């Protein structure tokens, strides 16, 4: 068997491009008008409008194809991905998709979109493992067979970003899409990157695109709050091959008052089971992911949690001496970047937001949890807590550096409401 190489479409590939796609479509569906149009004239339908076609070549034979159709702006639709029948199940589709994504990155695509069908379960799993996630349709489809819509935002992590992230959290084990890896990544992230809102108090905006978060939390040695932590964590999980669903929660912290859904959390689908992952809650947040099994009690290094079902929603609780304490309530409705952008703007700018009014820095550990609220430093263990009031701004800066790993120039002053 010859080595498979990938290259851009040549006019001589037109017949192979059509035949590869007609083969798989006819196996499960019926060729439609749009199929005939695109496969009959790929130059006009794909290339002339700024798109690209990638061919997989084995020897002198075309064994795969995939195209990018320009949608306007920086968005492209991934279409007509096909693998020759005798080459399926050998990893060729994964290699082809990776090459197409790299090509999309080279032409500065910001977003990839695709349409598919639930019958193509293996393809959907492949797309998900490559960072695509389901979304509502963005425009009317040309195909009656389409019932699944997915997108991939192209500001994802590079291999160097992942390497830097693993160094930042001290994770040295191989990345595999297993429960053990999920647990070890979660603990390492939660205990090495602090929760904090300090940029807000310095008058700086909170940017929640992946590359801005990498620059701040990974390379900048800083922490952040939920949108930063869990956006980064979700991107790392996707890079490691996990299937991730981004969710939102209403923070309770012991109250039954209905608050807006301003907390980001992550659901991970693994071996047929859902896990709640949340490295960005601070306070009494999880050290390990929690299986989504309502009523099951789980202890994480001395701290005890459970998820309970409350009507149509779930509630994460922690165990206090006086009983169960509600942390937040959530549903399994998937959230999108625009949902977090709106919530992030609110919590980082609204004058009544606690992130605008208070200095917050928190860092859970294996044996204790540190929390700094303005000048009040608390260290909590499973059996009790100690508290000290820092005397002045210099002590705050010193504590941030020594206890939280957050270093600022001596002249730095944070603007917040005094106790």
Image: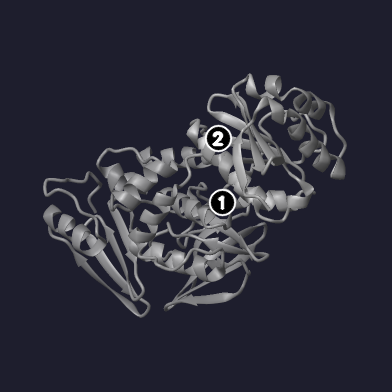
Is there a contact, CB below 8 Å, between mark 1 and mark 2?
Answer: no
Compared to residue 388, the image places residue 234 above or below, namely: above
Q: CA distance from mark 1 to mark 2?
A: 20 Å
Q: How is the image coloured?
A: one colour
Q: Secondary structure at mark 1?
A: strand
Please indicate whether residue 68 sits to the left or right of residue 373 in the image: right
Compared to residue 141, the image places residue 281 above or below, namely: below
**Label 1: few (<14), some (14–19) or many (≥20) C-alpha neighbours in 10 Å:** many
Q: How many marks?
A: 2
Which residue corresponds to the image point at 75% horizontal and 22% vertical from the top-left? Answer: 41
Q: Position of residue 389 (x, y in %)?
A: 19, 63
Dividing the picture into quadrants, the one containing residue 384 is bottom left
Q: Is residue 412 visible?
A: yes
Compared to residue 373, the image places residue 215 above or below, namely: above
Which of pointers 1 and 2 lies earlier in the amino acid sequence?
2
Please indicate whether residue 111 sits to the left or right of residue 21 in the image: left
Q: Position of residue 168 (x, y in %)?
A: 33, 59
- Residue nearest the viewer, comparing 314 with 233: 233
Circle 2 is placed at which residue position?
A: 111
Q: Secondary structure at mark 2?
A: strand
Which residue corresponds to the image point at 30% horizontal and 57% vertical from the top-left? Answer: 361
Which residue corresponds to the image point at 12% horizontal and 54% vertical from the top-left? Answer: 394
**Label 2: few (<14), some (14–19) or many (≥20) C-alpha neighbours in 10 Å:** some
Q: Position of residue 39 (x, y in %)?
A: 77, 28
Q: Is residue 265 visible?
A: no
Dividing the picture into quadrants, the one containing residue 141 is top right
Please indicate whether residue 185 sits to the left or right of residue 223 in the image: right
Q: Quadrant of the C terminus?
A: bottom left
Q: Position of residue 166 (x, y in %)?
A: 39, 60
Mark identifier at residue 136: none
- Residue nearest the viewer, comparing 237 with 332: 237
Mark identifier at residue 247: 1
């Amino acid at each position: 068997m010859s080595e498979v190489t990938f290259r851009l479409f040549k006019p001589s590939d037109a017949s192979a491009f059509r035949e590869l796609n007609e083969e798989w479509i006819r196996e499960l569906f019926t060729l439609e008008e749009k199929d005939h149009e695109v496969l009959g004239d790929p130059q006009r339908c794909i290339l002339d409008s700024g798109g690209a076609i990638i061919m997989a070549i084995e020897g002198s034979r075309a064994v795969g194809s995939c195209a990018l159709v320009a949608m306007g702006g920086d968005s492209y639709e991934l279409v007509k991905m096909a693998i020759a029948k005798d080459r399926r199940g050998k990893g060729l589709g994964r290699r082809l998709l990776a090459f197409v994504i790299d090509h999309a990155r080279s032409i500065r695509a910001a977003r990839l979109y695709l349409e598919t069908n639930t019958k193509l379960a293996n393809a959907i799993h492949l797309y998900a493992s490559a960072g695509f996630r389901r979304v509502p349709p963005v425009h009317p489809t040309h195909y009656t067979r389409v019932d699944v819509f997915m997108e991939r935002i192209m500001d994802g992590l590079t291999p160097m970003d992942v390497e830097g992230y693993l160094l930042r959290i001290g994770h040295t084990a191989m990345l595999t899409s297993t429960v053990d890896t999920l647990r070890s990544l979660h603990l390492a992230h939660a205990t090495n990157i602090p929760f904090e809102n300090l940029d807000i108090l310095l008058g700086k905006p909170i940017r929640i695109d992946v590359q801005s978060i990498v620059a701040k939390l990974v390379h900048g040695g800083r922490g952040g709050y939920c949108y930063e932590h869990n956006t980064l964590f979700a991107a790392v999980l996707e890079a490691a091959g996990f299937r991730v669903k981004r969710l939102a929660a209403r923070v309770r912290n012991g109250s039954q008052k209905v608050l807006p859904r301003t907390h980001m959390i992550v659901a991970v689908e693994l071996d047929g089971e859902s896990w709640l992952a949340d490295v960005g809650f601070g306070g009494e947040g999880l050290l390990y992911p929690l299986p989504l099994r309502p009523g099951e009690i789980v202890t994480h290094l001395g701290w005890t949690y459970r998820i309970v079902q409350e009507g149509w929603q779930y509630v994460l609780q922690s165990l206090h001496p006086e009983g169960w304490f509600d942390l937040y309530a959530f549903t399994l409705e998937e959230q999108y970047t625009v949902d977090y952008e709106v919530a992030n703007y609110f919590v980082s700018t609204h004058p009544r937001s606690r992130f605008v009014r208070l200095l917050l820095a928190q860092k859970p550990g294996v044996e204790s949890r540190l929390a700094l609220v303005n000048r009040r430093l608390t260290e909590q263990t499973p059996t009790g807590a100690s508290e000290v009031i820092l005397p002045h701004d210099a002590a705050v800066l010193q504590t941030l550096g020594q206890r939280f790993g957050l270093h600022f120039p001596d002249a730095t002053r944070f603007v917040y409401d005094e106790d």
